[in-house]
Image (cartoon, rainbow, N blue to C red):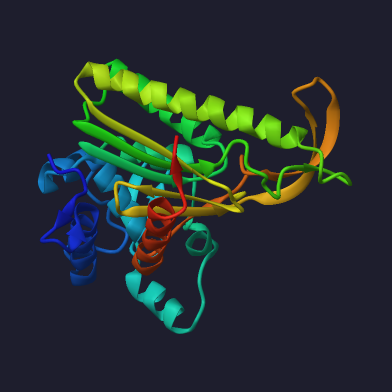
Amino acid sequence: MSNDRTVGGARREYERVADALRHEIEGGAIAVGEQLPTHAELVDRFDVSRATVQKAIKALEGEYVESVQGKGVFARDWRKSVAAHANGTTTEAAVGAGSVELDDAIAEAFEADDITIDAYCLTAESLNAAIVPQARRILRGELEPSSIHVRLLLARPGAHLAIPRIVGDPDDTRPLDRLSELIERHAFTLRNLLEDLGRRDVEVGVEVRTLPITPVAKYYLLNRHQGLMGFYKVEANTVDLPDGESARIHDVLGLGARLYLQGPEQRAECQQWFDSLWNTIAESV
């Protein structure tokens, strides 16, 4: 079964499915208001994964189809959507369509046979939390990927980073000591988690490199075709320092950061940016 690889070096599988359904709706083979075939029927018809079908449907939502909870997916009047776009209008659904949860994106990525993840973030805490459920699915035999390869760019433990720092006392290094502990803990946990899967007939590669920079944005490239970008907010936050004292610090907080899907051009630019950091000033750990 296909796993959303490129077709003819250009189109991915979900685009092939979306294009076919779009043509049927535009041509009237699927009438406005008519229910589309079920996900299971589309999986059989196009010989793709369920995740690919879901992604194809999502690509059509708002313009060509609408999902009705508990009933299915129905064809919309695409001519009205085209006219609305021509008039410069849009819907709330279209505006919000770019926001995605990392857990959902990672779950979809793990449906592939060959999984690749490039990630640039502060500590990898969110990435760890998203991968753990998928690792459990592999251990239970629900997923059977052939390979998992991860490149992880993190802030450098021990570097004199601009953030975090104590409010009013930027020379106090204890917030940096705390950050170093978090980075080392989450990087170690992620590496161990994935390498454990390597002992279960999965080809695993995990590379971790660090930068002497505090990230103000987080970036994930999943399976080479889905790019997600989000921004850390700098906020004052009370934390417990390694010596047990509590302090008010300026910190970059990413757990609540929204991630946005990128188009092909943005994704290509971000891939070049990631590679430029990876291949120049990043250091292996």
- Whole-percent x, y for residue 174 in the image: 76, 32
- Residue 232 shows in this picture: yes
Residue extending furthest toward the right: 168
- Residue 70 shows in this picture: no
Numbered circles on residues, count: 0
- Whole-percent x, y for residue 268 in the image: 35, 64
Image quarter hosting the C terminus: top left
- The one nearer the camera, 205 or 93, is 205
Image height of 231 relative to 141, above or below: below
At 45% from the left and 77% from the top, the residue drawn is 84
- Answer left or right for 254 relative to 198: right
- The one nearer the camera, 228 or 119, is 119
Q: Quadrant of residue 2?
A: top left
Image quarter hosting the N terminus: top left
Residue extending furthest toward the bottom: 87
At 37% from the left and 37% from the top, the residue drawn is 207
- Whole-percent x, y for residue 179 in the image: 65, 34
Image height of 211 relative to 240, above or below: below
At 47% from the left and 57% from the top, the residue drawn is 97
Image height of 207 relative to 252, above or below: above
- Whole-percent x, y for residue 215 in the image: 59, 50
